[in-house]
Image (spheres, rainbow, N blue to C red):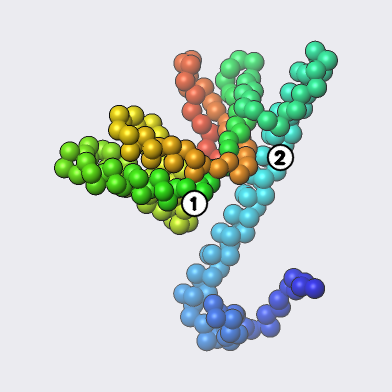
Amino acid sequence: MNQNILETIPAGYMKNALGHLVPEANVREQDKLRDQVARSLVTDARNINALLAAFKKKALGDIDDLVKIAGERYDVTLGGKKGNISVSTYDGQFKVQRSVADVLQFTEEMEAAKALIMACIKRWSEGANPQISALVSRAFAPGRNGQLKTAAVLDLLRIDIDDTEWKKAMQALKDSINATGTAVYVRVYERIGDSDQYKAIPLDLAAV
């Protein structure tokens, strides 16, 4: 049975990326400083991650309880974990949204859809709208994780072209979409002044 054993590095040594123990006296000061900064930031990141996880758990639990209480008022049993819910403060200053979205993956039929779409682009060649070509290129360009970008692929379904082969391609595209589960998101918003517009309170690093 595999067990996670906490590795102990002997005093006076540091382990390098190859797993070798190196005497601290042989490690450059810049390397030590870089190691210190990285470890400090990782510690902070883990703490923030734990706080976000606790917040999400509390938010989903509180919203679920609110839905159940609403159902009990009318003697209705509600499964509060599905569906989109918006919870606002009495003055409308803030609102918290629970959003449930399908997790989509593409089956092998995507390859057929891709071949049909590329055949259309090739057939249209000079007369093809450059915006459509750009959308197709973006849709089939793999992301950083090597997977197709779901939003970009779904954008193709919004293009209405009166062409038999294109319609066949879009049908193949629809058939390739497979919902494998659901993802639950918690988003927090604050009203902008006295308007009816809201701005998100960022909970991810990219948006801060």
Depth check: give the residue in front, 175 or 28: 175
Q: Label 2 amino acid?
A: Lys
Q: Position of residue 192 (x, y in %)?
A: 48, 22
- Residue annotated with mark 1: 108
* Residue at the (54%, 64%) spot, across then down: 38
Which secondary structure, mark 2?
A: helix
Which secondary structure, mark 1?
A: loop
Mark 2 → mark 1, Cα distance in angstroms: 36 Å
Label 2: few (<14), some or many (≥20) within 10 Å? few
Q: Which image quadrant is residue 73 in?
A: top right
Using the rendered image of the protein, determine whether residue 207 is visible from the camera's viewpoint: no
* Residue at the (34%, 29%) spot, across then down: 160
Depth check: give the residue in front, 22 or 165: 165
For discs 2 and 1, the disc positioned in front in the rendered view: 1
Q: Which image quadrant is residue 183 in?
A: top right
Identify the residue at the far front of this view. Answer: 164
Q: Position of residue 173 (x, y in %)?
A: 44, 41
Q: Position of residue 81 (x, y in %)?
A: 71, 32
Q: Label 1 amino acid?
A: Glu
Q: Earlier in the sequence, mark 2 or mark 1?
A: 2
- Residue annotated with mark 2: 57
Depth check: give the residue in front, 203 or 175: 175
